[in-house]
Image: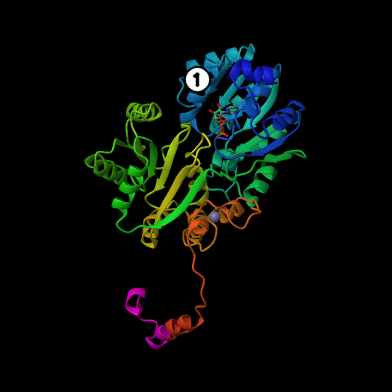
Amino acid sequence: MKKLLKQYFGYDEFRPLQEEIINHVLGQKDSFVLMPTGGGKSLCYQLPALKFPGLTLVISPLIALMKDQVDALQACGVKAEFINSTLTPAEINEICVRVKNYEIKILYVAPERFALKDFQEFLKTLNINLIAIDEAHCISEWGHDFRPDYRNLSLLKKLFPSVPLIALTATATQKVREDILNQLGLRSPRVFISSFNRKNLNLSVIEKKKAFPKLLGLINKYKNESAIIYCFSRKETEEIAENLKLNKINARAYHAGLETNERKLVQELFIKDKIDVIVATIAFGMGIDKPDVRLVAHYTYPKTLEGYYQEIGRAGRDGLPSECVMFYTYADTRKHEFFMNQMEDALRERAREKLSEMLNFAELMSCRKKYLLKYFGEEMKEDSCGACDFCLADKEMFDATTITKKILSALIRTENRFGKNYIV
Ligand code: ADP
Ligand code: ZN
């Protein structure tokens, strides 16, 4: 496998867990892989795919990314293709013919394609050796990114009982994990979980007051280095980018409202260090693999911890110290609520829960990393991470019993009618 790793991908060593996972997959057994973004999940099915005689099928929800993934594989000399709604029927037909002739090793398909009976029939005629389900959390309603089309994947085990499955995701709480295993019907799968503790990331939450000057200060601290600023809305990205430009920062806005070409261009300029700061909505980042992002800031706090973890995960891929700063004010909750109110009842409830977990994190009075890791089911052994605002703060301890009693007494005597500032 190491030879293939070098030959096709140019790497000398496996990353943690990759080798174990690949061996397990080659043994034709089911696996579940939970690894942070950038951990190297793709290789866990791409490399076995090269070794298997038949086809490897990859189900991926990210239509926009399929082409990039396939292009990258082709550039490495791997025979890969994708089928999704961006192709014409004639193009799809042509690919199916090549799949049929085993001229293709790895085929990426979108879940809605898999839902089609005809396509399932076609797949049944093939020698499929491995099925990979990328972004497997999309199958679960308990997750943060449920895709109804993923529900059809429960059929995989029924249609292909003898083909090993590998489910991969970067974010799954215990509940979602169990849901994935159940829904896919994995057979005594081995579960591979790599540590989510990104030790080189420094986490902090700061008060969103005089926010723009604070942001400017942060960005100037990383002059001529790469930063991503996540905003709540398209409008906000453009305003902030404009203001940064006025302050001589080489910044650009990025959001889903831009034309495809413009988006591509901005991404490319960022990757090539021609733009220092990307001011983006969460549309930015999927598939971005820039190693030297030194700062990720959330100008508005994100709506889920899963999203937060994924976004800060784009900092410091090269392992060097990097900073993640979240601007927090409770007032921003209204922005999230506005959107939640437009959701279906069932989803809204779930979204509320996620948001309140996010708020707990924002207002936390203990180690942020410990909390975050625990949320993803990982126990941090140390009491202090040494890399979050709580652990790094100079803390003065004193007995506040008397003063607390006085404050509470003031609250009661003023009949709970006043806000914090008045009471103070
Ligand atoms: P994930 O899907 O877990 O987010 P990817 O599979 O996209 O991560 O891998 C992230 C980056 O790490 C890619 O650029 C990939 O080529 C690189 N990578 C994967 N495995 C290795 C390895 N063994 N050695 C060096 N780089 C690797
Ligand atoms: Zn800490």
On the question of residue 105 being in view, the answer is: no
Q: Give the range drawn in magenta.
A: 410-424
* Protein image colouring: rainbow
Residue extending farthest bottom: 413
Judged left or right of residue 392, residue 231 is left
Q: Residue 73 at x, y = what percent?
A: 55, 20
Q: Does the residue labelled 1 lie within 8 Å of ligand 1?
A: no
Helix or strand or loop: what does disc 1 sit on?
helix
The residue positioned 56% from the left and 48% from the top of the image is: 143
409, above or below 3, in the image: below
The three-letter amino acid code for the residue at tag 1 is Asp
Between residues 137 and 294, which one lies in front from this camera angle?
294
The residue positioned 51% from the left and 55% from the top of the image is: 354
54, above or below 298, in the image: above
Q: List the residue tagged with mark 1.
A: 71
Q: Residue 324 at x, y = what percent?
A: 45, 47
The residue positioned 47% from the left and 27% from the top of the image is: 85
Is-magenta flag for residue 321?
no
Q: Residue 282: name its quadrant.
A: top left
* Image quarter where ligand 2 lies: bottom right
Q: Residue 112 at x, y = what percent?
A: 54, 33
Q: Residue 195 at x, y = what percent?
A: 63, 43
Judged left or right of residue 41, residue 25 is right
Between residues 389 and 212, which one lies in front from this camera angle?
389
- Number of disc labels: 1
On the question of residue 323 being in view, the answer is: yes
Position of the C terminus by quadrant: bottom left
281, above or below 423, in the image: above
Is-magenta flag for residue 420?
yes
